[in-house]
Amino acid sequence: MDPESVAELLRRYSIIPPNADGSGARPLHGGHVAALGGHRRDGAKLITFRIGSVSESRFCPFEADEASEIVRRFQDQQLLPKHAAFARMIENLIELAAKMYAYEQIDSFVFDDVHLHESDYQIGDAQILASKVLRLRHPKQTPSEGSRRYDARVNSIEKNSGR
């Protein structure tokens, strides 16, 4: 997918997209660097979180507390600090990515160079592969906009009621 479509899809799931447009946001350096991705194994979707050479995978969609279990594993190995707000931020990112992967027609995705800081994260690069066309824009049709379906339904009701 092209970078604009990737950014739009990430925003739909409240995931902060990479700063590819040079909008002036300060890049994050230091902290913990991770990767997050989704792939298929034997037809099932998996989410994998990785820091260095340690990774943890779970089937998608997630059951309750699976993101917490992933983060706890990295905390137990002292790869992430045991700070509640920091852990919740990472859990939230993993949960949102898992939700996106579960509900969209995505074949795979990778978030590389994810810089994790105490109160923020920044995705360095995001790649999403989809063999089917994703419908990213959903135009709203309301009666005031005169959608054809609405007008046809009203006309049909009026004819049948004798107006």
Image: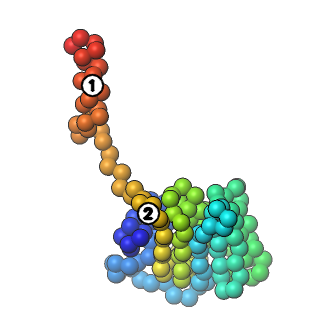
The answer to whether residue 47 shows anywhere in this view is yes
Q: From the viewer's perspective, is 51 left or right of 128? A: right
Nearest the camera: 17 or 156? 156
Q: Residues within 10 Å of mark 2 (few under 14, many from 20)?
A: many
The dot on residue 68 is none
> Which residue position is annotated with label 2?
9
Type of amino acid under label 1:
Val
Quadrant for the C terminus, please.
top left
Residue linked to disc 1: 154
Q: Secondary structure at mark 1?
A: helix
Residue at (59, 74) in percent of width and height: 36
Seen from this angle, which residue lies furthest right? 76
Q: Is residue 145 above or below residue 128?
A: above
- Please tell me which residue is depicted at 50% across the width and 59% down the height of the picture: 105
**In this rendering, position of residue 94 left or right of residue 64:** left
- Could you say which is closer to the camera, residue 130 or residue 7? 130
Total label count? 2
Neighbor class of circle 1 (other Cα within 10 Å; few <14, some 14-19, many 20+) is few
Res 22 → quadrant: bottom left
Mark 2: which secondary structure?
helix
Q: Residue at x 47, y 79 (%)?
A: 125
How far across and how far down the image is residue 139, in percent?
32, 49
Image-quadrant location for residue 56: bottom right
